[in-house]
Image: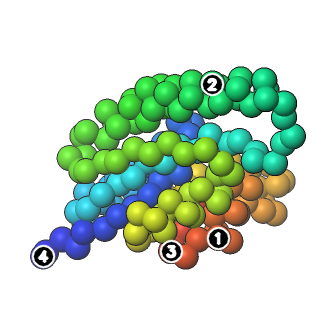
Amino acid sequence: MKKKNVTYLVGYDGGALSQKAMELAAEKVAERGGLLILLYVIDWSEFEVMSVEELAVRHQQQLEQLESAQTDILDPAQEKLETYDIEVETVVQVGHAGEVISAVAEEKGADQIFVGHKSGGLLAKLALGSVAYSVLQKSKVPVTVVP
């Protein structure tokens, strides 16, 4: 049976639920062949009034967070994925997680998005976490929400 190459994107934050989503997506990519994209989103609101000094500090903080996200979160995840023998790409973006995940999936031509479900207790029974819900609303491709 010939493998169909797929591109799956995982909204990844290093937590247990996003690791479950990553592992599920990796298994599927290993079966079908293709690419797994791990996306970490640094949540920064674009709509804040700031002084020039505050903007300079914020810019430096963003640079530090971008570097930290890659070395502390995505690089270890990529190491875990070596056992699957699949192609992995890591991406770090700044913005609102739901919007960024959907936009990067479209930009990269992803066939499917995988995200973890973070809500707990009664809220979990009534609604999804805000990121998962946002991705479901905005995505133009299928979304798998991993509990």
- Which amino acid, mark 2? Gln
Vertical side of 1 occupied by 18: above or below: above
Q: Taking 31 as reference, is 147 above or below it? A: above
Name the residue furthest front: 52
Q: Mark 4 points at which residue?
A: 1
Element at label 3: loop
N-terminal-most mark, 4 or 3: 4
Query: What distance separates the C-alpha of mark 1 from that of mark 4?
Result: 34 Å
**Crowding near the residue tagged with mark 3, few <14, some 14–19, many ≥20 C-alpha atoms within 10 Å:** some
Q: Which residue is drawn at 50% across and 42% down?
A: 92
Q: Which residue sits at x=31%, y=33%?
A: 79
| Residue type indicated by callout 3 | Val
Alpha carbon of mark 1 to alpha carbon of mark 3: how far? 9 Å
Which type of secondary structure does the marked residue at label 2 adopt? helix
Q: Position of residue 119 (x, y in %)?
A: 74, 50
Find numbered disc 1 in the image and state the secondary structure of the residue it sits on.
Answer: helix
Instruction: Name the residue carrying label 1.
Output: 138
Q: Position of residue 10 (x, y in %)?
A: 47, 53
